[in-house]
Amino acid sequence: MADETVTVPPEHAVRVIQMPFEPSVTRTPGGTILASFGSAGDDADRELDMVLAGVERELATPSTVNVVALNGRIHMSELFEPAHPKTMAMPSPIAWCFHAGAVASVMASPARRRKLHERIQHIARIPIMQSACVLDGPTPAVTAFMQLVREHDVDVRNPDSSQGGLAVLIEVTRPGGEIVCVVAGQPVPRDGAPPPQDGMTEPVITYRSPRLLQVMLDAQARGNATAVIVTELLQRDVPPFVMRFKSGLELRNFGGDRTLPIYADATAVQWAAIDLGKPRESYEPAPVDLRGVLAQCAKTDVGIAVGLYRDRATPMYAVVPAAVVASLVAHLTSGDGSR
């Protein structure tokens, strides 16, 4: 869709469908199935199964979508009457959406990669039109994903950010009720980053922590279990984050505890920096090896504060005092620790 500002004529309605940050499966007013894996999170297996099951439910009640046949760029005005854009009637097309880190998360796991590929392959045989919109790219993981779905004619695109959002679809309701749909964004170049070797992709960066959040809420309800929270972090296969300043790491006091803040995901560290008034150029959101951080904290008699956000307005911190950190490190180094 070409960059432009247009006036919507009377009796027309325009809907710009944005890429969801959270996993979800919805059907747009025009009938397209929007299957979003959201941004990369710490419960990827469960969320993948949830999205694939949601797609199956939506496919059980098919609808016909008038998809505009793209041949190069199209102007929004070409979707309004009296223009007659060329359309194709498609049964329940699927728009797969991968927000930040989601492609790397899928491709990093052979089981997740296989599940998604089998589902895309099955849907292609029906046949049903599929497109994929990826926020990242071109990265090794995106290149590997494109190779995976190329044989099934899945059009892989980046979202359209020209108007400040992350548009994946544009739907126009014309006088009389006809809805036409355009796949937004630009095709991802096929000559991007080289594909990874032996199925490996770049490290996965998480932007959400639904599993850890539930562990924290359960611990809060019981009034204990900071050690359980740290154990959950240790068992994850993705790193937490710290704010690394030019002067090093900054400690924070929570009550009487001197702690090093450790953030569960990239979103938490970004939002915390904003809330603390830290300019973006003053720090680096750095992934860290939790075991190494715990060992260093134990040596310097410092606790940790595990931070994440329940929502944008609700930060949560689980404070693990220095004595508990020292006990955890002793347990880990004794050979009885997790992993």
Image: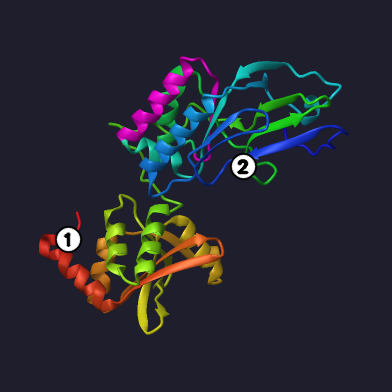
The spot of residue 194 in percent (x, y) is 40, 31
> What number is the disc on residue 166?
2
Residue drawn at point x = 27 percent, y = 58 percent: 234
Where are the magenta residues, as a range? Answer: 110-136
Residue 192, position in %: x, y? 47, 31
Disc 2 element: loop
Closer to the camera, 234 or 228?
Answer: 228
Residue sitting farthest toward the bottom: 256
Of the 4 image quadrants, the one containing the N terminus is top right
Give 121 or 216, whichever is nearer the viewer. Answer: 216
Task: Identify the image quadrant of residue 248.
Answer: bottom left
Quadrant for the C terminus, please. bottom left
Which residue shows up at 42% across the image and 25% down it? 119
Q: Mark 1: which secondary structure? A: loop
How far apart marks 1 and 2 lie (CA) works out to: 43 Å
Q: Tell me the residue that label 1 is attached to.
A: 337
Q: Is residue 282 visible?
A: no
Q: Is residue 160 left or right of residue 45?
A: right
Q: Residue furthest left?
A: 334
> Which one is nearer the viewer's eye here, 208 or 297?
208
Amino acid bearing label 2 = Leu
